[in-house]
Amino acid sequence: MTTVTFKINGKAASFSGDGDMPLLWHLREDAGLKGTKFGCGIGQCGACTVHINGEAARSCSVPMAALDGTSITTIEGLADGERLHAVQEAWIKEDVAQCGYCQAGQIMAAAAFLKDNPNPTDDDIDSGIDNLCRCGSYYRIRKAIKLAAQNLAGA
């Protein structure tokens, strides 16, 4: 049995159980945070992307035992109170979502990406964001990331 303490969306949390259990299941089943989605279960699609210590991570591939002392942010914790993150605002403005299933992971990946790439080109986005979208809304995703970058630069 593994016991770890960490933060989820700024709040203290702990886990005691099978250390091999993926973070995704803890978020969805124990913490009740349903915004992080299960997609492929092998870290390929990105639907389960969260931030761990500010870096994008595929929560389906992160064991609970690796989380002691970390800070986790999910889509539910990305906004600052009632104020949406610039990426969330851009997603709405550009009407990115079609089915919407992958969007929480896409948004989390984009928010982390923009911290290191404040003025990305299409090539930067294509090589830096590898989350999958079955609906194929990549053109709108790129537009939203660029809009968010502009908004963050002007903030």
Image: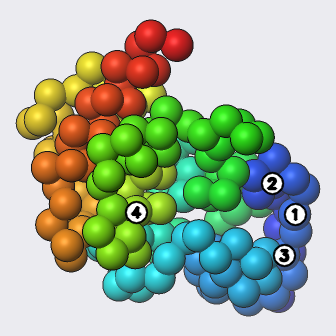
Q: Amino acid at mark 2?
A: Lys
Give the CA distance from mark 3 to mark 4: 27 Å
Q: Nearer the viewer, mark 4 or mark 2?
A: 4
Tell me which numbered mark, 2 or 1, is placed earlier along the sequence: 2
Q: Tell me where residue 100 appears, x and y as whole percent.
A: 38, 70
Q: Amino acid at mark 1?
A: Ala
Between residues 154 and 108, which one lies in front from this camera angle? 154
Image point (42%, 13%), residue name: 153
Between residues 42 and 96, which one lies in front from this camera angle? 96
Q: Which residue is mark 4?
A: 103
Contact, mark 2 vs mark 1 (Cβ under 8 Å) = yes
Q: Is residue 2 visible?
A: no
Tell me which numbered mark, 3 or 4, is placed earlier along the sequence: 3
Q: Secondary structure at mark 4?
A: helix
> Which of the 4 image quarters holds residue 75?
bottom right
Q: Amino acid at mark 3?
A: Phe
Give the CA distance from mark 4 to mark 1: 25 Å
Q: Which mark is residue 15?
A: 3
Image point (40%, 63%), residue name: 103
Above or below 137: residue 65:
below
Q: Which residue is mark 1?
A: 13
Q: Which residue is mark 2?
A: 7
Q: Secondary structure at mark 3?
A: strand
Give the CA distance from mark 3 to mark 2: 11 Å
